[in-house]
Image (tube, rainbow, N blue to C red):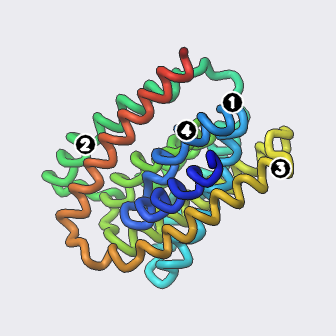
Amino acid sequence: MEFALVLVIGLAAGALGGVVGFGTSIMLMPVLMIVFGPREAVPIMAVASIMANASRVLAWWRVVDWPAVRAYSVTAVPAAVLGARTLLAVPPGLIETVLGVFFIGMIPLRRWMAARHWHANLWHLAIAGAGLGFLTGLVASTGPINAPIFLAHGLVKGAYLASEALGSLAVYLAKAAVFHTLGALPVDIALKGLIVGGSVTVGSFAAKGLVGSIDPARFRVLMDLLLLVAGCSMLWTALRTAG
Protein backbone atom coordinates (compact mmCIF):
# COMPACT_ATOMS: atom_id res chain seq x y z
CA MET A 1 0.00 0.00 0.00
CA GLU A 2 2.83 2.39 0.82
CA PHE A 3 4.51 1.70 -2.53
CA ALA A 4 1.20 2.17 -4.32
CA LEU A 5 0.85 5.56 -2.62
CA VAL A 6 4.34 6.49 -3.83
CA LEU A 7 3.36 5.61 -7.40
CA VAL A 8 0.15 7.65 -7.25
CA ILE A 9 2.01 10.67 -5.90
CA GLY A 10 4.70 10.07 -8.53
CA LEU A 11 2.04 10.32 -11.23
CA ALA A 12 0.78 13.64 -9.84
CA ALA A 13 4.33 14.90 -9.31
CA GLY A 14 5.24 14.04 -12.90
CA ALA A 15 2.23 15.97 -14.15
CA LEU A 16 3.21 19.00 -12.07
CA GLY A 17 6.80 18.85 -13.31
CA GLY A 18 5.54 18.45 -16.87
CA VAL A 19 3.69 21.78 -16.58
CA VAL A 20 6.16 24.00 -14.68
CA GLY A 21 9.49 22.17 -15.11
CA PHE A 22 10.05 21.41 -11.44
CA GLY A 23 8.17 20.31 -8.34
CA THR A 24 8.46 16.56 -8.93
CA SER A 25 11.00 15.99 -6.16
CA ILE A 26 9.25 18.54 -3.91
CA MET A 27 6.16 16.32 -3.88
CA LEU A 28 7.95 12.97 -3.92
CA MET A 29 10.91 13.42 -1.59
CA PRO A 30 8.96 13.70 1.71
CA VAL A 31 6.99 10.55 0.83
CA LEU A 32 10.13 8.66 -0.21
CA MET A 33 11.80 9.60 3.07
CA ILE A 34 8.83 8.26 5.06
CA VAL A 35 8.48 5.01 3.07
CA PHE A 36 12.12 4.15 2.35
CA GLY A 37 14.12 6.28 4.79
CA PRO A 38 16.52 9.13 3.93
CA ARG A 39 19.44 6.84 2.99
CA GLU A 40 17.48 5.17 0.16
CA ALA A 41 15.28 8.15 -0.69
CA VAL A 42 18.10 10.29 -2.16
CA PRO A 43 19.39 7.74 -4.75
CA ILE A 44 15.84 6.63 -5.58
CA MET A 45 14.93 10.26 -6.25
CA ALA A 46 18.07 10.67 -8.38
CA VAL A 47 16.99 7.79 -10.66
CA ALA A 48 13.40 9.04 -10.79
CA SER A 49 14.65 12.56 -11.62
CA ILE A 50 16.63 11.19 -14.57
CA MET A 51 13.47 9.64 -15.97
CA ALA A 52 11.36 12.74 -15.21
CA ASN A 53 13.74 15.06 -17.04
CA ALA A 54 14.20 12.62 -19.91
CA SER A 55 10.42 12.48 -20.41
CA ARG A 56 10.19 16.29 -20.58
CA VAL A 57 13.03 16.40 -23.10
CA LEU A 58 11.27 13.81 -25.28
CA ALA A 59 7.96 15.65 -25.03
CA TRP A 60 9.46 18.98 -26.17
CA TRP A 61 12.52 17.83 -28.15
CA ARG A 62 11.88 20.10 -31.14
CA VAL A 63 12.11 23.35 -29.17
CA VAL A 64 15.29 22.68 -27.14
CA ASP A 65 17.56 25.75 -26.94
CA TRP A 66 20.86 23.95 -27.55
CA PRO A 67 23.24 26.89 -26.88
CA ALA A 68 21.58 27.48 -23.50
CA VAL A 69 21.82 23.80 -22.59
CA ARG A 70 25.50 23.63 -23.56
CA ALA A 71 26.39 26.78 -21.63
CA TYR A 72 24.65 25.51 -18.50
CA SER A 73 25.81 21.89 -18.66
CA VAL A 74 29.51 22.50 -19.32
CA THR A 75 29.95 23.81 -15.76
CA ALA A 76 27.00 22.12 -14.03
CA VAL A 77 28.06 18.51 -14.72
CA PRO A 78 31.53 18.61 -13.11
CA ALA A 79 30.14 20.72 -10.27
CA ALA A 80 27.44 18.09 -9.63
CA VAL A 81 30.11 15.39 -9.34
CA LEU A 82 31.92 17.48 -6.75
CA GLY A 83 28.66 18.19 -4.89
CA ALA A 84 27.65 14.51 -4.76
CA ARG A 85 31.06 13.59 -3.33
CA THR A 86 30.73 16.35 -0.72
CA LEU A 87 27.27 15.20 0.39
CA LEU A 88 28.38 13.06 3.32
CA ALA A 89 30.50 15.85 4.85
CA VAL A 90 27.64 18.38 5.09
CA PRO A 91 25.79 18.74 8.44
CA PRO A 92 22.24 17.31 8.18
CA GLY A 93 19.59 19.92 7.41
CA LEU A 94 22.00 22.80 6.71
CA ILE A 95 21.71 22.84 2.91
CA GLU A 96 17.93 22.32 3.02
CA THR A 97 17.53 25.29 5.39
CA VAL A 98 19.62 27.58 3.20
CA LEU A 99 17.80 26.49 0.04
CA GLY A 100 14.37 26.83 1.66
CA VAL A 101 15.06 30.46 2.54
CA PHE A 102 16.61 31.04 -0.88
CA PHE A 103 13.64 29.55 -2.78
CA ILE A 104 11.22 31.88 -0.99
CA GLY A 105 13.58 34.82 -1.53
CA MET A 106 13.65 34.04 -5.27
CA ILE A 107 9.99 35.12 -5.60
CA PRO A 108 10.60 38.89 -5.17
CA LEU A 109 14.01 38.57 -6.87
CA ARG A 110 12.48 36.99 -9.99
CA ARG A 111 9.84 39.70 -10.14
CA TRP A 112 12.53 42.38 -9.67
CA MET A 113 14.54 40.94 -12.56
CA ALA A 114 11.44 40.73 -14.76
CA ALA A 115 10.43 44.33 -13.97
CA ARG A 116 13.88 45.53 -15.09
CA HIS A 117 13.87 43.22 -18.12
CA TRP A 118 17.08 41.57 -16.94
CA HIS A 119 18.27 39.07 -19.53
CA ALA A 120 20.47 36.08 -18.70
CA ASN A 121 23.01 35.53 -21.47
CA LEU A 122 25.02 32.35 -22.09
CA TRP A 123 27.78 33.45 -19.72
CA HIS A 124 25.21 33.90 -16.95
CA LEU A 125 23.92 30.38 -17.62
CA ALA A 126 27.45 28.97 -17.39
CA ILE A 127 28.14 30.75 -14.10
CA ALA A 128 24.78 29.66 -12.68
CA GLY A 129 25.45 26.10 -13.85
CA ALA A 130 28.57 25.84 -11.69
CA GLY A 131 26.74 26.82 -8.50
CA LEU A 132 23.51 24.97 -9.23
CA GLY A 133 25.31 21.82 -10.36
CA PHE A 134 27.17 21.69 -7.05
CA LEU A 135 23.95 22.25 -5.07
CA THR A 136 22.13 19.55 -7.06
CA GLY A 137 24.88 17.15 -6.07
CA LEU A 138 24.05 17.89 -2.44
CA VAL A 139 20.23 17.96 -2.41
CA ALA A 140 17.32 16.30 -4.20
CA SER A 141 16.48 19.23 -6.46
CA THR A 142 17.40 22.81 -7.32
CA GLY A 143 14.73 23.13 -10.00
CA PRO A 144 13.13 26.18 -8.33
CA ILE A 145 16.44 28.04 -8.74
CA ASN A 146 17.00 26.79 -12.29
CA ALA A 147 13.60 28.10 -13.34
CA PRO A 148 14.23 31.87 -12.96
CA ILE A 149 17.62 31.57 -14.71
CA PHE A 150 16.22 29.82 -17.80
CA LEU A 151 13.16 32.08 -17.82
CA ALA A 152 15.44 35.13 -17.69
CA HIS A 153 17.15 33.80 -20.82
CA GLY A 154 13.83 34.38 -22.58
CA LEU A 155 12.58 30.79 -22.61
CA VAL A 156 8.94 30.01 -21.81
CA LYS A 157 6.61 27.03 -21.89
CA GLY A 158 7.89 24.20 -24.15
CA ALA A 159 11.30 25.73 -24.87
CA TYR A 160 11.89 26.37 -21.17
CA LEU A 161 10.68 22.90 -20.15
CA ALA A 162 12.85 21.10 -22.71
CA SER A 163 16.02 23.14 -22.20
CA GLU A 164 15.94 23.16 -18.40
CA ALA A 165 15.14 19.43 -18.37
CA LEU A 166 18.02 18.55 -20.71
CA GLY A 167 20.49 20.53 -18.60
CA SER A 168 19.16 18.88 -15.44
CA LEU A 169 19.27 15.45 -17.08
CA ALA A 170 23.02 15.80 -17.64
CA VAL A 171 23.48 16.83 -14.01
CA TYR A 172 21.43 13.95 -12.58
CA LEU A 173 23.24 11.41 -14.75
CA ALA A 174 26.53 12.64 -13.30
CA LYS A 175 25.08 12.48 -9.77
CA ALA A 176 23.79 8.92 -10.28
CA ALA A 177 27.19 7.86 -11.63
CA VAL A 178 28.85 9.13 -8.45
CA PHE A 179 26.30 7.31 -6.26
CA HIS A 180 26.99 4.11 -8.21
CA THR A 181 30.76 4.54 -7.84
CA LEU A 182 30.43 5.07 -4.08
CA GLY A 183 28.18 2.02 -3.72
CA ALA A 184 25.09 4.06 -2.84
CA LEU A 185 23.07 2.83 -5.83
CA PRO A 186 22.73 -0.98 -5.59
CA VAL A 187 20.46 -2.87 -7.95
CA ASP A 188 17.43 -3.01 -5.62
CA ILE A 189 17.46 0.76 -5.03
CA ALA A 190 17.98 1.41 -8.76
CA LEU A 191 14.94 -0.78 -9.52
CA LYS A 192 12.83 1.17 -7.03
CA GLY A 193 13.95 4.38 -8.70
CA LEU A 194 13.01 3.02 -12.13
CA ILE A 195 9.54 2.00 -10.92
CA VAL A 196 8.91 5.37 -9.28
CA GLY A 197 10.36 7.12 -12.31
CA GLY A 198 7.95 5.21 -14.55
CA SER A 199 4.94 6.75 -12.81
CA VAL A 200 6.57 10.19 -13.02
CA THR A 201 7.16 9.71 -16.76
CA VAL A 202 3.51 8.89 -17.40
CA GLY A 203 2.49 12.03 -15.52
CA SER A 204 4.94 14.18 -17.50
CA PHE A 205 3.56 13.11 -20.86
CA ALA A 206 -0.03 13.44 -19.63
CA ALA A 207 0.63 17.08 -18.74
CA LYS A 208 1.92 18.13 -22.17
CA GLY A 209 -1.50 19.24 -23.37
CA LEU A 210 -1.91 21.58 -20.39
CA VAL A 211 1.19 23.64 -21.15
CA GLY A 212 -0.12 25.11 -24.38
CA SER A 213 -3.28 26.35 -22.67
CA ILE A 214 -1.44 28.45 -20.04
CA ASP A 215 -0.56 32.01 -21.04
CA PRO A 216 2.96 33.24 -20.10
CA ALA A 217 1.73 35.57 -17.33
CA ARG A 218 -0.16 32.83 -15.52
CA PHE A 219 2.77 30.49 -16.12
CA ARG A 220 5.06 32.86 -14.17
CA VAL A 221 2.51 33.24 -11.35
CA LEU A 222 2.39 29.45 -11.11
CA MET A 223 6.20 29.50 -10.86
CA ASP A 224 6.04 31.87 -7.90
CA LEU A 225 3.53 29.66 -6.09
CA LEU A 226 5.77 26.62 -6.63
CA LEU A 227 8.79 28.55 -5.35
CA LEU A 228 6.87 29.26 -2.15
CA VAL A 229 5.86 25.61 -1.78
CA ALA A 230 9.43 24.52 -2.56
CA GLY A 231 10.86 26.81 0.10
CA CYS A 232 8.44 25.60 2.75
CA SER A 233 9.08 21.98 1.74
CA MET A 234 12.85 22.42 2.07
CA LEU A 235 12.46 23.99 5.52
CA TRP A 236 10.21 21.12 6.58
CA THR A 237 12.79 18.61 5.33
CA ALA A 238 15.52 20.44 7.25
CA LEU A 239 13.50 20.28 10.48
CA ARG A 240 12.78 16.59 9.95
CA THR A 241 16.45 15.84 9.24
CA ALA A 242 17.62 17.82 12.28
CA GLY A 243 15.09 16.05 14.47
Q: Residues within 10 Å of mark 3 (few under 14, many from 20)?
A: few
- Measure the C-alpha gap from mark 2 to mark 1: 28 Å
Give the total of numbered labels.
4
Q: Residue placed at 62% from the left, 45% from the top? A: 2
Q: Residues within 10 Å of mark 4 (few under 14, many from 20)?
A: many
- Residues under numbered marks 3 and 1 in contact, where contact means CB atoms less than 8 Å apart: no
Q: Is residue 183 visible?
A: yes
Residue most extreme to the bottom: 62
Q: What is the number of the mark on residue 107?
A: 2
Residue 1 horizontal/vertical position (percent): 63, 49
- Measure the C-alpha gap from mark 4 to mark 1: 10 Å
Which of the two discs, 2 and 1, labels the residue nearer the N terminus? 1
- Measure the C-alpha gap from mark 3 to mark 4: 26 Å
Question: Badge 1 is on which residue?
Answer: 86
Q: Residues within 10 Å of mark 1 (few under 14, many from 20)?
A: some
Residue most extreme to the left: 115
Kind of element beneath mark 1: helix
Q: Residue placed at 85% from the left, 51% from the top? A: 187
Q: Residues within 10 Å of mark 2 (few under 14, many from 20)?
A: some
Question: Badge 4 is on which residue?
Answer: 135
Q: Which sits in the foreground, 110 or 8?
A: 8
Mark 3 vs mark 2: in front:
3
Question: Badge 3 is on which residue?
Answer: 188
Q: Residue placed at 43% from the left, 28% from the top? A: 236
